[in-house]
Image: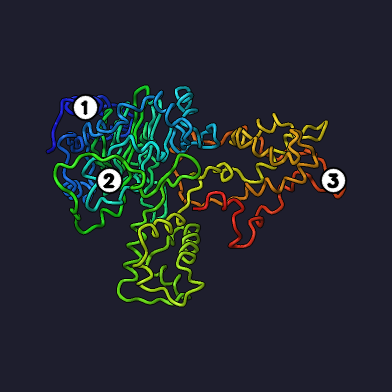
Amino acid sequence: MVSISSRFLQSCCLIVIIVITHQHQCYGKETIRGHMQPLGTHRDPEGHVDIFEADQLPSAAEFFNKYVKPKRPVLFRNAAKASPAFTKWSDEYLLENFGNLQVKLESKLEKKVVPIGDVGLGRDTISHFLNTYKSRDVYIVSQLPDPMAKDVKVPPCLTCGSFHNRIMEANLWVSNGGTSSLLHKDALNTLNCLINGTKNWIMISEEHIKNIPMAQEPESEIGGFSMLNVDKVNMERYPNFAKVPWHYANVSSGDCLYIPTGYLHQVRSTGPKNLAYSLLLDYNLIHLPQFNNSGCTQGRDYETLDASKIVWNYPGYGSMTMGNPSPWGIRDGFITAFKGNKKVKAKNFVKFIRKHGLVMEDNPGRAKLQVKAFKQFFDIENKEYITSEDVLNLSFKDWTTITSFLDPDSANREDFEYYNIDRRMIKKVIKKSIDKSTGRLDKDLFLKNYQLIRGSIPFGKKNMAILDGNNDGIIEKEEIKQNLEKLLKLFDTEAVDDMVVVTDRDYLQGREEDPERERLLADEEGNEEDEDEEGRSPYGDDEEGEEGEEGEEGEEDPRRDRDEL
């Protein structure tokens, strides 16, 4: 049963006051409502999203039919209070119980430079984050480490029937408040549960996306973001945005908000500490013809989030699986393609799966990886045919294994730093960190210069250890010559291009390049460097191999054996 609380009525009054305050302001010759004002002032809201109290949540079938299938947001008031996390997750408790676990970091200005933690670029321990986050421009947006799952309870409407095995992953959000997201849409259905602070959401149905300026992305991408400056919407540049209706959701500690796949939203968080967890549900749920109600008996209670029931896990260290594709989509696509008693010649297998849309053709980088993964998984080199039986006999675990290789995100890797810095950068850092009087590497200067190219101190020390061949703490010129290529190979990485194109200059404000970094990387005229007897630089040739250093197609990544799934 949908209810209206006093908090809801207060929120309505607040929204009305904000709108009245801004709607009569004049800009230039004509009044354009909402011009250069925060997102949401361009027109009155349509109202608050539906609300259910925690003791009156919808049944699984009702939730699916009224909200999941038709893609409608809904708020579960006080539902997060059923989780032990609501009372336990103080800074002190998190430090004592989970302090050594690793999490991903983001800047408060979304899409800005990736911040550095005590593990490396974009990676921090929970203990270091909690001891520093109040004075840093960072927050945790990370896959929830598995050990923390025991403190999370899942509402009964998500634990039976067609929702079985549909929790793709769980995420963790922590900040000191004052964060503001872009207007964006996510690929997965999300239940975002707030433990501390408040979050105010602007919600826009994707049916209005034609009137919203979005960054250009491949059609196969379900998520995406708008180029609107959410603090100062330029209504003159985007007059069609005035046609876009919106709802709002005011979320307080203890509440859970359901956001459907593809539903546009913008979030502002307040409070001295903002902490939330989210459960991400398979987007393929919306394609189910009807809900399977098996096991959905009345009177069922909240269940503990069992890490073994989450499709994509993260133990709290090593590489994450955050944002991995859904095995259900891959599975369903193959079953449909091989429907009936099909028998496909192995030599025609790649052509067959491409014909049936099982490869991301609009992203060449991902398409190449996917074709390679499918060929290896189905072992087409050693088979004459791939049959319907081969496909139908695969378990869900098999589909999860193959899906893990289809869309890798370098930001999930513990060595992400090596993907963010190329060999040209590291060679320049070494070159500019040599003590001219001794020819040795000035270690303090190296760390300083390495940080200028957005490297971290932990990885900077690892890099110096590789150059220090005899481990005596002194890096001689000869050691640099002998060990340089070994170090550079770590930076010979190739992340898959997400093919996102941003054309709006307003979006780029605050995300400009670091001038000191550019200065370090710039070639200095007349800069002389030491050469050996044959006239070669011990620090490598900056121009050599910029195009052709990657090796032959199919050559193994020298770091692959570190964390291969």
Task: Return the x and y of residue 1 as percentages of the image width and height.
Answer: 12, 38
Q: In front here: 387 or 205?
A: 387
Q: Is residue 482 above or below residue 86?
A: below
Q: Nearer the viewer, mark 1 or mark 3?
A: 3
The CA span between labels 2 and 3 is 62 Å
Residue positioned 81% across, 48% down in the render:
536
Disc 2 residue type (three-letter): Pro
Q: Is residue 32 above or below residue 382?
A: above
Task: Return the x and y of residue 509 as percentages of the image width and height.
Answer: 47, 34
Q: Which residue is mark 3?
A: 532
Nearer the N terminus, badge 1 or badge 3?
Answer: 1
Q: Which residue is mark 2?
A: 260
- Asked whether, in this view, residue 158 is left or right of residue 558, the answer is left
For the question of whether residue 423 can be seen, the reply is yes
Task: Find numbered disc 3 in the image and state the secondary structure of the residue it sits on.
Answer: loop
Q: Which residue is mark 1?
A: 11
Task: Return the x and y of residue 399 as percentages of the image width and height.
Answer: 39, 59
Circle on res. 318: none
Task: Find numbered disc 2 in the image and state the secondary structure of the residue it sits on.
Answer: loop
Disc 1 residue type (three-letter): Ser
Task: Return the x and y of residue 354 as percentages of the image width and height.
Answer: 42, 68
- Asked whether, in this view, residue 542 is left or right of residue 371, the answer is right
The CA span between labels 1 and 3 is 72 Å
Residue positioned 73% across, 45% down in the render:
483
Nearer the N terminus, badge 1 or badge 2?
Answer: 1
Q: How is the image coloured?
A: rainbow
Nearer the N terminus, badge 2 or badge 3?
Answer: 2
